[in-house]
Amino acid sequence: MPCSLPGARLVANAVKSLVRGVSMDKRTIRDVAATVAAGSGVLLLADLSTGWYRVKVAVAGVVDVNGTANGWGGLGTVAGLLTIAMLVYMIRPVRGDGTVGFVQAAVTAMLGLGAFGFTVARALTGVASVTTPATSVQVQSTLWPAYVGIALATIIAGSVITALVLVMRGATTRSPVTRPAS
């Protein structure tokens, strides 16, 4: 079944080239890295909305309520906003001739690295606090979506750094989208 999304087609063709042992040019690798970063960014935004921590609230030792807290609290909000900014900046049009400049690649890389840092910080500092008398809040455990968030943020960081390095090495023009041979 052929892919209808240009980004998915680009990644699929890159994987086929790697399997066949065909070398790819820098522009194609840069475009694949950008596509992977964008896809991971969208997945990270969805992952931030899932339950990252198991939370227990005890009121005066009589009522116990168990629930989950998502990744959007505290530092996760900054990570989410940086990811959104990265995605918006990646979507912004490049010059008319299809050139991706160093500034665009550098800003995208900084936003992606910021999202990585704040995602890791949020995942490793699962805190919740309430200052009501006779009420306690405990973060009992970090759940698997927090670790998925770290993995997605790591993929984003690696992809944006790869794209930045390739732009620094001259991969500035748009690569042609190739269609797989039938």
Image: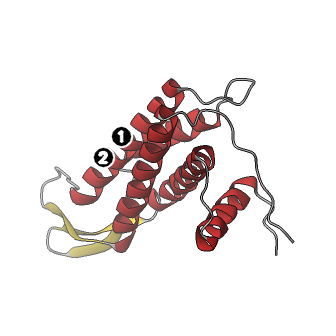
Identify the residue at horizontal 48%, vertical 56% (top origin): 44
**Whole-percent x, y for residue 107 in the image:** 46, 30
Q: Label 2 belongs to which residue?
A: 117
**Whole-percent x, y for residue 97 in the image:** 74, 26
Residue 130 is marked as none
Asked whether the residues under the numbered discs 2 and 1 touch, taking CB atoms below 8 Å apart as contact, a structural biologist would say: yes
Q: In this view, does 45 lie to the left or right of 55?
A: right
- The quadrant of the picture occupied by the N terminus is bottom right
Identify which residue, 136 or 96, lies in the foreground: 96
Quadrant in which residue 133 is drawn:
bottom left
Identify the residue at horizontal 18%, vertical 75% (top origin): 62
Cα–Cα span, label 2 and label 1: 5 Å
- The image shows a total of numbered marks equal to 2
Relative to 108, is 128 above or below?
below
**Whole-percent x, y for residue 61 in the image:** 14, 73
Given the image, on which type of amino acid does mark 2 rest? Gly
Identify the residue at horizontal 48%, vertical 35% (top origin): 169
Label 1 crowd bin: few (<14), some (14–19), many (20+), radius 10 Å: many
Q: Is residue 150 left or right of residue 156?
A: left
Given the image, on which type of amino acid does mark 1 rest? Gly
Mark 1 secondary-structure assignment = helix
Identify which residue, 33 or 71, lies in the foreground: 33
Residue 114 is marked as 1
Q: Is residue 133 visible?
A: yes
Quadrant in which residue 80 is drawn:
top left
Mark 2 secondary-structure assignment = helix
Most extreme residue toward the right, as rendered?
A: 182
Label 2 crowd bin: few (<14), some (14–19), many (20+), radius 10 Å: some
Relative to 7, is 18 above or below?
below
Quadrant in which residue 170 is drawn:
top right
Q: Is residue 169 left or right of residue 146?
A: right
Q: In this view, does 95 lie to the left or right of 150?
A: right
